[in-house]
């Protein structure tokens, strides 16, 4: 008994020490904190935590804490092949109708005979809600809540009757758990009740073997899951009426985890109870401080690789909601841009880890049974945008779940290639879900867009470009790219008007209806063929196959400049200069692609810029994020940076709107509604202002805005296997350090200063601001 008490007291002291010391670090560095002086009222004010597998939104409400949580594999539906058998019988007719200008007939026929079965894909589901009620805590003072990006700890603190109460929430990847630690400053004064609820029609709460469980089943589909909360405390535990009460405690930790019967897109035979028990087993042998420490180490191994300082941080004493509002009034807060960038990295680490599902439209955070766009993976921009910061900002490992999604779509996409196009290889259209649907969905003018496969493949190539990992190229990237290229090599047809090879039927994502030959498709397919040709050369394989691709590349419809000096969005010169559509797909070649660039095609760059000027600035969140990247690639840092005036417009509510994006008070991107892609797109966009490596050299400060004329960045990555740190003052580059990971020759440029030098793998090279070694 005595030893027990001693251990408990020791543990408590340790917890207090950890809490206090962590508090100190946090106070010292507001640059990496989101913080608020009141609890969240809306879901988009709550703070997100996640470990790739579990996500949670922490409201920080005092009398009744609300932690809404997700397990990433709970979706509607079941293993399914979405192919519309025999669709390929109508392909020629649809093409012919488009060639004859009979777009409406082509649309009708496609809608009837060419779309997936069923026509919509499945939806990501919320799992449940954990509530912790604190009787008597209605009147509180000294309230604070925060999310510390430096250690991925979310904290709430307040006082009741002069006693301080702390709460911490962490989502630990090594422990596959969300841990909620509750602490009272006064001994034995912590009393609370813990309960579960869920939005699902089928939900069952039980208590067995020291664990409160919540069982749920999705309404439409094969998936079910169980969540469990185990509570470890120095107080008393009682179970009654579906709730566990903790009384007379000083410290309590709730360990929350969840599991479903999902194994993979073909197999739903998992035993969730067994998985859950194994996930929570460690609780027996580890203390909260140990778990917290291991969580922080794991997180910081990724997070600490990159730092950024954009100068002025004078507003960082303002609570984040106030700071956002104040940015909207006078946009001179570069520190908020730096925080937003690190938040983007935090969100990626929290929603996409090795072995988990990739980040979907809402990352991993969703509270609705019918989320907007099913909270799935939209591959005509959104899913890819989620991964723009991955390589660039030194989170290459977080890219892995997306590679697995691509590999799985390369399996499911084979029947679609066969049934819809009578082609070999694989294809993916504009969406996929957890079942890896690959067929055209929803409606012909959106869904019939066969170049999703080409776009996602560019991520495999980019991973190789950044890491120079030849094993990855040989074993994973090239086989998948090759089979996609095989599909497109058979799918392309000769345009009777021009003789060029074109993609048809298709659409320029969501703009202008079902057509033959949208520009974006040709950029995507041309790029994929080039990646394959280069890969085969590097690997010394497949001369014959890539020889065939090389012949086709030159025949693919080229980028064309139209009557207004614009880059044509379609084969025909029919762009409307007043069109303000949020998608700017024909600029894919500028970013994230490289089909058009300042070095090789300056005239096309000008035309692309003209197209973007016509499109205007304002748009949904992700479109704002994309435009930052475009303006950075055009070398116009001031225009790129000005997009933050729009992106930092404070937003509320959850209505779906197709114009006017901004940010919610928790800095989630507001499409609106919440969609995480904008966070990631804008995060990458800031990096594109400071460094670009898509041409034959690494360009330093290629689009530096006046507002960011002094700063420092480290751990930013460049193609060729380089990691860089550099500093600039009054717009002038001061010092550069290059770490060569792969021993490639390094070509650096800043303005008209250039240098090229050989490197050895693992060595660092220091250069002056004049690029002298
Ligand atoms: C595409 C976009 C919408 C939204 C949705 C998820 O349909 O056009 O703006 O991002 O995907």
Image (tube, rainbow, N blue to C red):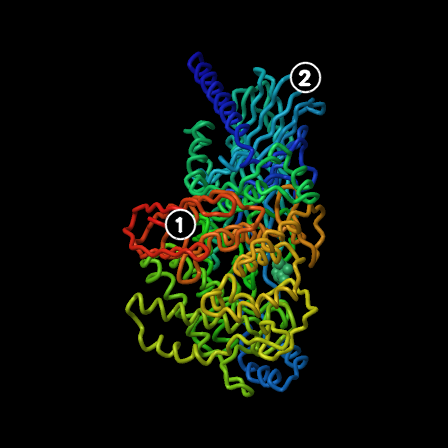
Left or right side of 701 for 658: right
Q: Is residue 295 above or below residue 624?
A: above
Residue found at the very far top of the displayed protein? 2
| Residue 467 image point, x, y percent | 37, 54
Q: Are marks 2 and 1 in contact (CB under 8 Å)?
A: no
Q: If the image is split into quadrants, where does the N terminus sit?
A: top left
Task: Specify the quadrant of the image occupied by residue 109.
Answer: bottom right
| Residue 385 image point, x, y percent | 53, 56
Q: Which residue appears at 62% of the width and 75% of the height?
A: 514
How many C-alpha atoms fall within 10 Å of the one at disc 1: few (<14), some, or many (≥20)?
Answer: some
How many C-alpha atoms fall within 10 Å of the one at disc 2: few (<14), some, or many (≥20)?
Answer: few
Q: Is residue 160 above or below residue 486?
A: above
Identify the residue under disc 2: 161
Name the foreground residue: 124 vs 568.
568
Label number found at residue 770: 1
| N-terminal label among 2 and 1 | 2
Q: Is residue 244 above or below residue 416?
A: above
The residue at label 1 has a CB less than 8 Å from ligand 1: no
């Amino acid at each position: 008994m005595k030893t027990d008490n001693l251990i408990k007291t020791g543990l408590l002291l340790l917890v207090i020490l950890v809490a206090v010391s962590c508090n100190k670090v946090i106070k010292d560095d507001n640059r990496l904190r989101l913080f608020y002086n009141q609890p969240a009222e809306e879901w988009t004010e709550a703070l997100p935590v996640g470990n790739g597998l579990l996500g949670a939104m922490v409201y920080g409400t005092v009398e009744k804490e609300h932690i809404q949580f997700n397990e990433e594999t709970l979706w509607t539906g079941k293993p399914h092949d979405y192919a519309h058998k025999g669709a390929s019988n109508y392909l020629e007719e649809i093409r012919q109708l488009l060639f004859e200008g009979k777009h409406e007939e082509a649309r009708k026929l496609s809608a009837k005979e060419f779309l997936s079965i069923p026509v919509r894909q499945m939806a990501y589901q919320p799992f449940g809600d954990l509530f912790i009620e604190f009787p008597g805590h209605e009147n509180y003072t000294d309230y604070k809540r925060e999310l510390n990006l430096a250690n991925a700890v979310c904290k709430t603190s307040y006082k009741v009757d002069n006693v301080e109460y702390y709460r911490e929430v962490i989502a630990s990847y090594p422990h596959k758990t969300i841990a909620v630690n509750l602490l009272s400053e006064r001994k034995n004064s912590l009393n609370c009740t813990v309960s579960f609820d869920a939005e699902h029609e089928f939900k069952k709460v039980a208590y067995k073997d020291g664990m409160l469980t919540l069982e749920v089943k999705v309404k439409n589909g094969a998936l079910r899951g169980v969540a469990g909360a185990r509570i470890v405390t120095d107080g008393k535990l009682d179970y009654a009426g579906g709730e566990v009460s903790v009384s007379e405690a000083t410290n309590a930790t709730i360990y929350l985890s969840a599991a479903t019967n999902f194994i993979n897109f073909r197999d739903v035979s998992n035993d969730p109870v067994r998985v859950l028990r194994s996930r929570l087993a460690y609780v027996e042998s580890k203390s909260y401080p140990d778990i917290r420490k291991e969580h922080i180490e794991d997180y910081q191994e990724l997070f600490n690789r990159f730092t950024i300082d954009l100068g002025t941080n004078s507003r960082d004493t303002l609570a984040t909601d106030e700071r956002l509002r104040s940015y909207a009034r006078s946009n001179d807060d570069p520190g908020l841009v730096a925080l937003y960038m690190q938040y983007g990295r935090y969100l990626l680490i929290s929603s996409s880890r090795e072995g988990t599902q990739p980040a979907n439209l809402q990352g991993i955070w969703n509270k609705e049974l019918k989320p907007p766009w099913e909270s799935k993976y939209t591959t005509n921009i959104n899913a890819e945008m989620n991964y723009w910061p991955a390589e660039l900002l030194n989170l290459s490992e977080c890219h892995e779940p997306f590679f697995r999604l691509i590999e799985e779509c390369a399996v499911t996409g084979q029947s679609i290639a066969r049934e819809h196009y009578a082609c070999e290889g694989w294809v993916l259209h504009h969406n996929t879900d957890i079942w890896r649907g690959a067929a055209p969905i929803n409606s012909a003018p959106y869904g019939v867009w066969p170049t999703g496969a080409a776009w996602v493949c560019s991520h495999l190539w980019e991973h190789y470009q950044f890491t120079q990992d030849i094993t990855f190229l040989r074993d994973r990237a090239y086989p998948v790219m090759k089979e996609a290229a095989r599909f497109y090599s058979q799918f392309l047809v000769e345009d009777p008007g021009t003789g060029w090879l074109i993609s048809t039927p298709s659409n320029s994502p969501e703009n202008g209806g079902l057509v033959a030959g949208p520009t974006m498709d040709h950029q995507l397919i041309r790029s994929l063929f080039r990646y394959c040709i280069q890969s085969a050369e590097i690997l010394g394989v497949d001369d014959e196959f890539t020889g065939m691709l090389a012949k086709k590349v030159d025949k693919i419809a080229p980028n064309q400049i139209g009557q207004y000096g614009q880059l044509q969005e379609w084969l025909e010169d029919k762009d409307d200069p007043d069109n303000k559509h949020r998608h700017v797909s024909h600029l894919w070649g500028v970013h994230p692609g490289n089909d058009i660039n300042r070095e090789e095609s300056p005239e096309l760059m000008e035309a692309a810029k003209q197209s973007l000027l016509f499109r205007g600035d304002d748009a949904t969140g992700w479109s704002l994020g994309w435009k930052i990247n475009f303006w950075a690639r055009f070398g116009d840092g001031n225009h790129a940076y000005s997009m933050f005036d729009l992106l930092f417009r404070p937003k509320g509510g959850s209505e779906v709107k197709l114009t006017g994006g901004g940010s919610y008070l928790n800095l989630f991107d507001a499409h609106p509604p919440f969609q995480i892609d904008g966070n990631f797109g804008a995060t990458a966009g800031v990096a594109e202002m400071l460094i670009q490596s898509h041409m034959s050299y690494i360009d330093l400060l290629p689009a530096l805005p006046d507002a960011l004329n002094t700063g420092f960045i480290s751990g930013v990555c460049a193609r060729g296997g380089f990691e860089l740190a550099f500093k600039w003052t009054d717009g002038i580059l001061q010092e550069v350090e290059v770490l060569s990971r792969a021993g490639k020759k390094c070509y650096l440029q800043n303005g008209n200063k250039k240098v090229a030098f050989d490197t050895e793998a693992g060595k660092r090279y220091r250069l002056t601001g004049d690029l002298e070694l």
